[in-house]
Image (tube, rainbow, N blue to C red):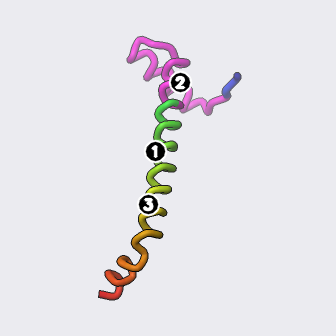
Amino acid sequence: MTVRLPEDLDAKLDEIARARHTSKHAVIIEAAERFANSESKTTRVMTLADGIIDRYADVMKRLEDA
């Protein structure tokens, strides 16, 4: 796969890779994994929050009116 990056982002990734003594490819893989894990957690949290809202809607309404 080919990825075209804006020049400023490409330069930042080069700098990070040099500082870590690794490849830009490895830095991008790590960033993609972090993003995917973060998005997955966000989806799970939002699903749980929706369930809690549904389950305790009456309690929340009473607290809102208090």
Residue type of the residue flagged with mark 3 = Ala
* 23 part of magenta stretch: yes
Amino acid type shown at disc 2: Ile
Which span is picked out in magenta?
4-32
| Element type where label 2 sits in the image | helix
Tell me residue 7's x, y (percent): 59, 30
Residue 9 x/y as whole percent: 54, 31
Say whether disc 3 or disc 2 marks the residue closer to the N-terminus: 2
Mark with earlier residue (1, 2): 2
Depth check: give the residue in front, 37 or 20.
37
Q: Is residue 24 above or below residue 38?
A: above
- Residue located beneath label 2 in the image: 29
Residue 15 location (% of width, % of height)? 45, 21
| Residue ranking furthest to the top | 21
In the rendered structure, find residue 49 and report the number of the disc placed on it.
Answer: 3
Q: Residue at x 55, y 18 (%)?
A: 25
Near mark 3 (Cα within 10 A), the count class, few <14, some 14-19 or many ≥20, is few
What kind of residue is marked 1? Lys
- The image quarter containing residue 1 is top right
Question: What is the C-alpha distance between the residues marked 3 and 2?
Answer: 30 Å
Label 1 sits on residue: 41
**Marks 3 and 1, how far apart in space?**
12 Å
